[in-house]
Image: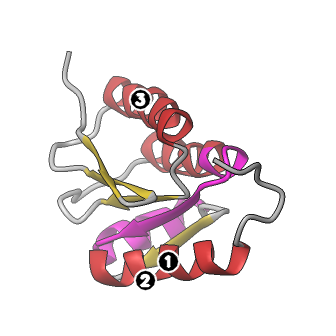
């Protein structure tokens, strides 16, 4: 079965989607990523979609769901590398991706995650 790699970088997980997303792959990513957040106690999730040329309504909803699940697991989600055509499509479909921050590139995305972690400190989180 095809899987998207999930890399750990400090307190964050990095997902770089380099293949065309289809429904089954998106659902597998959702399961794999939530498991990794829980296992690693990651505070941030950075999802690079720069290779995606098309995002349909299902994939858009899956990205929003992944962010919601990450938020419940106390991790912040940042989506990076969104192409203008993808942004236009998401807006036209009415998908606002609540709970998902966006950045132009990985470097800015990691800065957003770092600032979010610094701001939240250990509020409500049990010590590791």
Label 1 vs label 2: CA separation?
A: 5 Å
Q: Residues within 10 Å of mark 1 (few under 14, many from 20)?
A: some
Above or below: residue 44 compared with residue 81: above
The picture places residue 7, in percent across and down from the top left corner, at 27, 48
Residue drawn where x is 58% and y is 52% of the image: 67
Residue carrying label 1: 114
The picture places residue 12, in percent across and down from the top left corner, at 43, 58
| Pointer 1 or 3: first along the chain | 3
Q: Find out whether residue 78 is within the magenta segment.
A: yes
Residue carrying label 3: 32
| SS at badge 2 | helix
Q: How many marks?
A: 3
The picture places residue 70, in percent across and down from the top left corner, at 60, 47
Is 117 positioned to the left or the right of 14 in the image? right
Q: Residues within 10 Å of mark 2 (few under 14, many from 20)?
A: few
Residue carrying label 2: 111
Q: Which residues are magenta?
A: 70-95
The picture places residue 72, in percent across and down from the top left corner, at 72, 45
Give yes or no for contact between labels 1 and 2 (Cβ–Cβ under 8 Å): yes
Q: Find out whether residue 106 is within the magenta segment.
A: no
Residue drawn where x is 44% and y is 37% of the image: 33
Residue drawn where x is 61% and y is 79% of the image: 118
* Camera-nearest residue between 105 and 35: 35
| Pointer 3 or 2: first along the chain | 3
Q: Quadrant of residue 107?
A: bottom left
- The answer to whether residue 105 shows anywhere in this view is no
- The answer to whether residue 5 shows anywhere in this view is yes
């Amino acid at each position: 079965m095809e899987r998207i790699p999930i890399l750990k970088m400090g307190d964050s997980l990095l997902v770089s989607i380099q293949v065309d997303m289809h429904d089954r792959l998106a659902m597998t990513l959702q399961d794999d990523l939530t498991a990794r957040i829980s296992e690693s106690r990651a505070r941030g999730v950075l999802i690079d979609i720069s290779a995606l040329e098309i995002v349909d309504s299902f994939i858009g909803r899956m990205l929003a769901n992944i962010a919601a699940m990450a938020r419940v697991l106390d991790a912040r989600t940042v989506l990076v590398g969104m192409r203008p055509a993808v942004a236009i499509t998401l807006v036209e479909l009415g998908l606002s991706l609540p709970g998902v921050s966006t950045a132009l590139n990985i470097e800015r995305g990691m800065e957003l995650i770092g600032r979010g972690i610094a701001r939240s400190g250990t509020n409500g989180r049990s010590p590791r």
